[in-house]
Amino acid sequence: MYGQEVPAYTTLVDVSREVNEDVLRAQGADAERLGSISRVTAERHGAIRVGTPHELQQVARIFAAFGMHPVGFYDLREAVTSAVPVISTAFRPVDGGELARNPFRVFTSMLTVADPRFFDADLRSRLETFLAGRELFAPELIGLADRAATEQELPRQEAERFLQLAVQAFELSAEPVDKTWYETLERISAVAADIGGVRSTHINHLTPRVLDIDELYRCMTERGIEMIDTIQGPPAWKGPDVLLRQTSFRALAEPRAMRTPDGSVVSGALRVRFGEVEARGIALTRKGRALYDTLLGHIDDQASQNPAEARGDIARAVWERHMPGSEQELAAGGLAYFTYQLSPGRPRDGSRPPTSISALVQRGWVRAEPIVYEDFLPRSAAGIFQSNLSGEGTRDNDQPGAAYDAAWLCGAIGRDVLDPFALYELQQSRSIAHIAHELDLTGA
Ligand code: OOG
Ligand code: NI
């Protein structure tokens, strides 16, 4: 559906596949260190945007039917360089086996209508009335979703119907857009207009995963597709890839019918949907993440002091000075997550294994496999949002912000929003418990 709506997306998927095949040819098994090629080829994330807690709660019910759970809380209003009036979470599988097969995730944002820095009392009440009067998800869709989640399955015909309705709910609607209302919201933020200016929702982008994002960037540019000017996230460097690197091509003008104040319908165009691509690295612990955030701060400082120098070069130099250059060092510093497996070549001479993880790895008893980062980065996300917006929007920083936080989000959607760090930690500690058991180290 999205490939038909946005043909450039198909190009992006084709180029991603080519790049991945090249990397696999060049690197062999190393290319699959952070996921099998079948997983990486199938891997996508999508982005959708809704307007109210009620709509978000319905989205959560739809994704629950697919075994996708809310993970992480992102407050994009607080992004330093590019604040956007939304808070977000991502719906994704959490089970290791499911992630290994197909980790499809959807970055889901909700407009922060109650935040007076963006919306004054009058606009807020008009927006709330508008949003209360629309229905994004048909009751039949929600009913089937609940049934699938409860029964853990649906009979074939109902399953087909459920999928059909779910896809339809995210199609771009042909219904004319109220031009005046859309423009009113656009003055605050183009994201506010995209979410609250129309009576339906749509997929904003779908993102394939590539194994070499620098190469992909070059290939897309060569094909004449204008990319945003940066790759968000960590720089390209010779050490291990951590977290997430993302880039996108600019939103494309799509024809949309507009209703003008005199009631006539004219053809217009809106630029909201874009193409994004990402490369994933190792999941960092809280300590590793703190280091990452600190280093981004260093890069910002140095970039503002040396405007003539390329940000990519500054970033690489910072990384080379402060970021551990190998997986072993990341593990030893407690900076990244790994799972541990018994090594097939472990000593079999009757000797007792050592009792610390690092000694077990060093002496060949156990192998460490990096855990891939399955989540998002608020600063990168805000950058992706912002680089595709026309105009800066407006914001009144003298007003207090509205308190939306992770606990608020749990309450709004009526289910736990999972902590990504806790999920990685659990994966790591389960694997350690398993090898401890196998090597009879329990109690050590
Ligand atoms: C979401 C932007 C954030 C990502 O990958 O970080 C995002 C949006 O534009 O709705 O998708
Ligand atoms: Ni995205």
Image: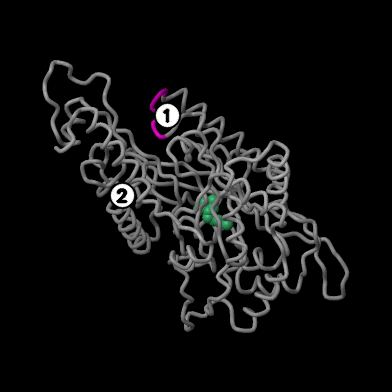
Q: Residue at x 25, y 43 (%)?
A: 324
Whether residue 267 is visible, yes or no, is yes
**Up-down relation of residue 390 to residue 206 (above or below):** below
Residue segment shown in magenta: 28-34
Ranked by sequence position, the earlier of labels 1 and 2 is 1
Q: Please state if 349 lies on the left or on the right of 398 as rendered.
A: left
Q: Quadrant of ligand 1?
A: bottom right
Q: Residue at x 42, y 51 (%)?
A: 233
* Badge 2 amino acid: Thr
Whether residue 229 is visible, yes or no, is no
Q: Position of residue 381 (x, y in %)?
A: 49, 56
Mark 2, other Cα within 10 Å: few <14 / some 14–19 / many ≥20:
many
Q: Please, what secondary structure does the residue beneath circle 1 have? A: helix
Q: Residue at x 49, y 64 (%)?
A: 409
Q: Which residue is mark 2?
A: 285
**Up-down relation of residue 155 to residue 253 (above or below):** above
Q: Which residue is mark 1?
A: 31
Q: Position of residue 305 (x, y in %)?
A: 34, 63
Main SS of the magenta segment? helix
